[in-house]
Image: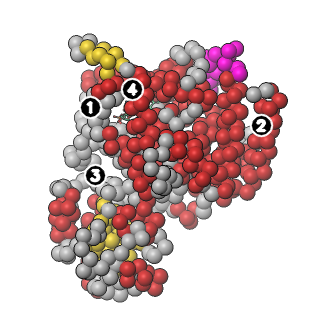
């Protein structure tokens, strides 16, 4: 790309950003819309005809219970505390066993729900149904229906009876007195390739939490602004979740408006504080307050940092060759400026600094991130073993384990624990794991935006979907981001012979 073309492209991109920035203040959601401070709320989620399909389509839970009731019915009022005792275990950020069962209720006495209740042939109140959440979406039930995916729950008049019924269905032993983080039932997910499909919820959770932290801690400063913009560009183009791509695009487009370079007064900082309350980059359902793939067996283990790793790997397998150096710097700078774990960011920064030549291939960058993560695992494995601070259910090991990818291992010397890797196979494993499998649940639900795309390539699941499925505003944001991203990638390529990354890292030392 010639210098003239590059300047033209950047000019057009800047122009587009200016034009759309003012019209995108809508990303700042109303406080009332997502006030998460409600303390006396019910645990069971109240649905109506409008929200029914959306909530059941969106839930990470494997099963759902729908209670059809009428608010005037005394038996329903008496049943509510029983139902709530069970809902407390499974619903909401304080759930003891989150992400397994979603307990909901629909008030059939509300006019808006009449058709919905008819579709499920509700003959008495309360009436409870059980099934996989997607089976309820656009679903129905009839009394004489055989082989239905939705089942009526009989004999669940008390909380005990309902939980006994649930335990039978799920082969579990949940108890009404279970306390949070008694996660003995959790099994290590390292060798089951399908488990990472649940990681898509954690990637959303980690993204959302990362931005909550950035906004709440006023981490956007003149010197950190550019690195956040770079990371947002990366998320807008390649985040595996459609709603996070959209949120990142929205924020990117409005960024100059929200954080003008020339205004860092205390008044502005106060405004930022109120923005922090309102902006949720992956939509108003996220953060959900719990982890799925990254759930630890202890309160203080796994979670956010696990979700962040999964996000970084998922980005690394979605980029093009021309974006590899840009992605490397975007990730290194983001971790350095915005990851609040001091030891983590210092160690990671050192590893970034030790890279002496720019990346030209997406494969090389993905493998660098993989081996860097393994080095962290190796170091932490020893530390955790000596201090006893690790998660006993999830000890640090090299990845991928043999059960996940035996062809990745060329040779494994058990005495020295030295592994000779087949890097082509490792890259393939990374792409499968963090590419297709990671979004497979969302693909089934149509949330990845790939409905009906059987056998879609990784690219179909990422960049290609952006243009098709997002609303116009976000599509424009993505176009702007891709344009700026492309221009920057070209710029990097043209500069790579004369520049070394350590110059940039050197400048970071002043932060
Ligand atoms: C950039 C970064 C730097 C960090 N540095 C430190 C540090 O210096 N000190 C510290 O105490 N903690 C550090 N952490 C946190 C630490 O690495 C773990 O995230 C945390 O201990 C939780 O571990 P976990 O068992 O959930 O697995 P994690 O290490 O978080 O890994 C998450 C998942 O990724 C997969 N995985 C594991 N290894 C690889 C690999 N090599 N390639 C691809 N996938 C893999 C596994 O499925 C694993 O369950 C860092 C985190 C990040 C994101």
- Dot 2: few (<14), some (14–19), or many (≥20) neighbours within 10 Å? some
**Horizontally, is 230 left or right of 422 in the view?**
right
- Dot 1: few (<14), some (14–19), or many (≥20) neighbours within 10 Å? few
Q: Give the range drawn in magenta.
A: 494-511
Q: Closer to the camera: disc 3 or disc 1?
A: 1
- Dot 4: few (<14), some (14–19), or many (≥20) neighbours within 10 Å? some
Q: Which of marks 1 and 2 is nearer the N terminus?
A: 2
Q: What element carries label 1?
A: loop
x%, y% of residue 155?
A: 17, 75
x%, y% of residue 414?
A: 23, 16
| Whole-number angstrom distance, CA of label 4 to CA of label 2 | 38 Å
Dividing the image into 4 quarters, which one contains the N terminus? Answer: top right
Look at the numbered discs 3 and 1 and tell me whether their residues touch, using CB distance below 8 Å.
no
Q: Earlier in the sequence, mark 3 or mark 2?
A: 2
* Disc 2 residue: CB within 8 Å of ligand 1: no
| Whole-number angstrom distance, CA of label 1 to CA of label 2 | 48 Å
Which residue is identified by label 1?
403
**Horizontally, is 413 left or right of 242 in the view?**
left
Q: Earlier in the sequence, mark 3 or mark 4?
A: 3
Q: Is mark 2 on a helix, strand or loop?
A: helix
- Dot 3: few (<14), some (14–19), or many (≥20) neighbours within 10 Å? some
x%, y% of residue 245?
A: 57, 47
Which residue is identified by label 2?
9
Q: Is residue 436 magenta?
A: no
Q: Closer to the camera: disc 4 or disc 2?
A: 4
| Whole-number angstrom distance, CA of label 3 to CA of label 1 | 31 Å
Number of labelled discs? Answer: 4
Which residue is identified by label 4?
425
| Whole-number angstrom distance, CA of label 1 to CA of label 4 | 14 Å
Which residue is identified by label 3?
180
């Amino acid at each position: 790309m010639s210098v003239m073309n590059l300047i033209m492209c950047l000019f057009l991109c800047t122009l587009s950003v200016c034009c759309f920035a003012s019209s995108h203040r809508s990303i700042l959601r109303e406080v009332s819309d997502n006030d998460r401070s409600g303390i006396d709320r019910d645990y069971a989620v109240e649905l109506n005809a409008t929200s029914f399909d959306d909530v059941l389509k969106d839930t990470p839970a494997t099963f759902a219970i729908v209670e059809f009731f009428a608010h005037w019915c005394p038996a329903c009022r008496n049943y509510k505390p029983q139902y709530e005792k069970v809902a407390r275990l499974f619903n909401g950020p304080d759930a003891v066993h989150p992400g397994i069962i979603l307990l909901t209720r629909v008030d059939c006495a509300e006019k808006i729900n009449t058709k919905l209740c008819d579709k499920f042939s509700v003959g008495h109140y309360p009436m409870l149904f059980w099934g996989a959440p997607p089976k309820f979406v656009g679903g129905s039930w009839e009394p004489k229906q055989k082989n239905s995916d939705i089942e009526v729950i009989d004999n669940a008049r008390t909380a005990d009876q309902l939980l006994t019924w649930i335990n039978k269905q799920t082969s579990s032993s949940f108890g009404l007195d279970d306390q949070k983080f008694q996660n003995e039932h959790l099994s290590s997910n390292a060798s089951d390739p399908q488990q990472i499909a649940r990681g898509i919820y954690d990637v959303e959770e980690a993204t959302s939490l990362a931005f909550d932290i950035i906004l709440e801690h006023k981490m956007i400063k003149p010197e950190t602004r550019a690195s956040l913009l770079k990371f947002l560009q990366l998320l807008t183009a390649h985040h595996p979740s459609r709603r996070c791509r959209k949120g990142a695009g929205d924020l990117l487009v409005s960024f100059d408006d929200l954080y003008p370079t020339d205004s860092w007064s205390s008044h502005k900082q106060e405004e930022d504080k109120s923005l922090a309350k309102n902006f949720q980059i992956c939509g108003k359902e996220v953060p959900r307050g719990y982890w799925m793939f990254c759930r630890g067996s202890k309160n203080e283990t796994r979670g956010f940092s696990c979700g962040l790793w999964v996000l970084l790997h998922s980005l690394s397998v979605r980029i093009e060759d021309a974006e590899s150096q840009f992605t490397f710097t975007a990730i290194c700078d983001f971790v350095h400026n915005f990851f609040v774990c001091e030891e983590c960011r210092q160690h990671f920064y050192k590893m970034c600094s030790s890279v002496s030549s720019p990346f030209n291939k997406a494969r090389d960058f993905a493998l660098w991130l993989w081996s860097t993560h393994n080095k962290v695992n190796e170091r932490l494995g020893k530390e955790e073993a000596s201090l006893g601070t690790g998660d006993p259910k999830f000890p640090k090991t090299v990845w991928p384990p043999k059960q996940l990818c035996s062809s990745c291992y060329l040779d494994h010397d058990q005495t020295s624990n030295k592994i000779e890797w087949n890097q082509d196979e490792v890259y393939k494993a990374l792409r499968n794991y963090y590419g297709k499998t990671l979004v497979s649940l969302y693909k089934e639900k149509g949330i990845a935006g790939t409905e009906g795309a059987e056998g879609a390539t990784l690219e179909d699941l990422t960049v290609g979907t952006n243009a098709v499925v997002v609303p116009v505003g976000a599509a424009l944001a993505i176009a702007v981001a891709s344009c700026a991203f492309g221009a920057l990638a070209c710029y990097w390529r043209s500069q790579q012979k004369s520049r070394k990354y350590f110059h940039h890292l050197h400048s970071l030392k002043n932060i």
